Amino acid sequence: MSTVVTSQARRRWLAVGSGTLLLATLLGVGPWLRATVAVEPAGTTPQAVLDRALASADVAFSATGESRGGLALPDLSGFGDLAALLGGTTDTRVWWGGPRRWRVDTVDALGETDTYGQAGSVTTWDYESRRLVTVVGDASARLPRADDLLAPTAARRLLGAVGPGDRISSLPARRVDGRVTDGVRVEPGDPRSTVAHADVWVDRATGLPLRLAVVGSGGTDALVSELSQVRLGQPDDAVLTPPAAPTARRSVESAPDLVARVAAASPWDMPDRLAGLGAVGPDLAGAPTYGDGLVRVAVLPLPPRTAEDVMRGATSAGSATEEVDGGRIVRIGSNLLNAVVVRGADQWHAYVVTGLVDPALLDAVAADLLADPPPPTRGFR
Amino acid sequence: MTPDEGRAPGGEGAVVTRGLTKRYGRVTAVDSLDLDVRAGDRYGFLGPNGSGKTTTVRMLLGLVYATSGDIEVLGRSMPRHAGRVLPEVGALVEGPGAYPHLSARANLRLLDAAGPPVAGGPLADGVGSRGSRRRRIEAALEQVGLADVGRRPVRAYSLGMRQRLGLAAALLRGPRLLVLDEPTNGLDPRGIAEIRDLLLDLNARGTTVFLSSHLLAEVEAFCTRVGVLDRGRLVAQDDLDTLRGPTGRTRVRVDDVAAGARALGLPPRDTERPGPFAGEGDLVLDGTSVADATERLVRAGVRVLEAVPERRTLEESVLELTT
Amino acid sequence: MIGVELRKLLRRPRTWVSIGLLCLLPVVVAVFLAVTGIAPRPGQGPTLLAAVLGNGALYPAAALGIVLPFFLPIAVAVQAGEAVAGEAAAGTLRYLLVRPVGRTRLLVAKLVSVIAYTLLAVVAVAATGYVTGVTLLGTSGQLATTTLAGTALTPADLAWRTGVMVLYIGWSMVGVASVSLFLSTLTDSPLAAALGGLAVLVSSTVLVALDAAGAVRDYLPTRYWLAWVDLFRDPVAWQDIQAGALVQTGYVVVLLGAAWANFATRDVTN
């Protein structure tokens, strides 16, 4: 309905509308422009990019990180924040002075958990429980921590595992956090892997992997981890030093979690080959690992009582127990990460077998373990 | 009387509209209104409820924007020059409005401080708004009879007191033009008379009064010019005297109607057809002047109590115009 | 006009009643904490509340944390919803406009008044929090004042962090206010304007928690509300606080622009 001031009103709304539109466009298009405009194509081979990424552990930086895991894992007692870590969004703040001098804060609205890496020890400050825990020595095996999912750390671990059978290729260069990065795509050569491909974007200037995206064979993002607000340079020393809170409860331990304790006390002499896979050094979670390239299977021996707890937890989370030759197994499945809890009929042998591989391969490993139970290590019994 | 007489120097009208129209969707609330209020007028804007009076008043004040047409108030176009026109206008629109938790004085102080500094007008002293504020507030409260109202909050006021406060707010700046929408709402007869005297006094000192009302009696008792609005259209706009023009008939009141009728050669009273018999002792005569009638009655020995040329009442004119 | 609006604000009983009620809740919480000595488990309940027992200096921040999710937005939305619609409902809007007060000027004055109210409320809660914290909970208890990272906080540190927090929460609330202020120019019912503003907040809170809305999440008004917690980290994480301030500024600018465009040419029929 028009009035004598309609044209004025129209002008005003036009001004406000176009201003809003401009703002929205800037917000929408700005990041896209920043990510794509003026990026020179890569001048190096994917292998060179990969090598630079692997050599980037000493690049000092500060940043904020975000990792989104898409793995639906049941919440098992004793496995800490594993399900949340791999199945949700984790916000972190990172100060990296080198592999033996770093700090990663996991932050949320209620508090934070800070992990300080130092030469020979890792100290964790938990605001919620006001505990300051120092773990001395490097556990041979442990559960993943938030810092393991940081884009550079996770990417280096993944790229370090790439074997001759896996394919690597270049992705178009793009900007991540405003920095020009070269992309590398890794595809497992072995069809038994549940990873379809993993993409890593490596900072052209420093070699620092800034973004990692692991895509499962189902086609969904299984893990995306990215750094933002990256500032290069040595972080302040004060930031990297654990707090001296006078009221904190302090403790010093040698094993940070269940897995580390179990792995340290494993009574079995594990075989050199399982289901056709050769043993490699302790890896991702530190447990005895079999396989090559991106196909890796970790075998974690469990004490009988823990095994019973884990099995109960898994079945109550909806998995079925299956009787097999020589024992029982419970399969815990997600689109990317699979695990089998194995319990021997003798009630002594029990394991968790896990890996980013096809469940059939895990079944085969389980069958091997049950068919030929490993002997006790010397010193036990 | 030429149309320019009575206007302020410069020859401006106080309120002039041309083709003023307001539509709400399909409803036309005000339809090509050509108002002509001259400076110094006591203008009565008359019309039944819902005829578009309030919408018109709101358009004059720049609260509601016209669909089409021009408005000139005090010689300047509205709403474009609202900032220069409105300081010289005092208004009471659709009942008073005040902050209920504050006293009358506090309300007036806030209202006065909200506006621009005092510019001119008959009551303004040109000292600047802050310096003269207290004095102007007291004067306005005095004028409307609220001087001794004290510190009570407006919440505790009667409807009549609120109405007076609204008038005081309109008078605060000594306006050249008062636009009043139903100003006597809620006032008792004495209050109405007081307010009427006040407005007459202000008008005598040069303030143009635009009074919108649905009360015929109020307009008839106060106004010099009348505009009649009916369903959004201006059906008449003229001097009150013209609207109440003589009918050409003569009305006489006698102590003996039957004798009077005989003396004037009228047929005797007939209950079926009243004819010239109006009321108890009144005769209405067609074609007989006041002088003739009195002469004939006096000669016949009938005592004449009253003899006047008959005038239409405003009510009759309005009913005639609006039906 | 701004002065007039501020005087109106300060002389209005409702202003003080609402601020008093806002301050009451943290006092009640403090009394219970002091009497029972039972602090919520860390990580549960309002942020920082766990840390205040025996350490009143942190209580201003905890007090704001208590009123932030609910009471503060309600108070601010009601106040802002009143701005224009309240004048319309009281019948005073038309008299202000014919005084005359320019419509844009009126809007600016209303905005300033709402901002003043917001700051007044936030500062009052913080001040009440400090007084009750120090008197009821004491300053020397079993817990030292620390950041979330466990490092010690000096009183000066705590003071400036609390100051910035007051400003940040204040600005977040101005974002809330701008929604209600805009609605207040659309309707003549102050209640509708206030409830409309709250409806926007509730929707935003729901969407922020929804992963499927990830694409727009960072632009929602309540996305960075809790970022004030970052002030109590060590080192202070400014990123979200800056982003939050910018998002609120965006909403304030756009909504006030819309309020201006609407109000300046709208028919005032009440």
Image (cartoon, rainbow, N blue to C red):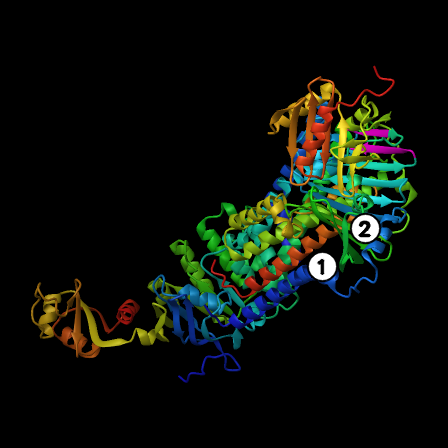
- Quadrant of res A325: top right
**Where is mark 1, residue-wise?**
A31
| Left or right for A37, reference C179 | right
Quarter placement of the C terminus of chain A: top right
Chain under callout 1: A
Q: Nearer the viewer, mark 1 or mark 2?
A: 2
Dots 1 and 2: beta carbons under 8 Å? no
Whether the magenta-drawn stretch holds residue A132 is answered as yes
Q: Is residue B307 above or below residue C139?
A: below
Q: Is residue B4 above or below residue C20?
A: below
Please name the amino acid that badge 1 sits on: Pro
Q: Which residues are magenta?
A: A120-134
Where residue B242 appears, as percent x and y from the top left, is: 32, 76
- Quadrant of res A176: bottom right
On residue A209, which mark appears?
2
Dot 1 falls on a residue whose secondary structure is: helix
Please name the amino acid that badge 2 sits on: Pro
Where residue A47 appears, as percent x and y from the top left, is: 83, 54
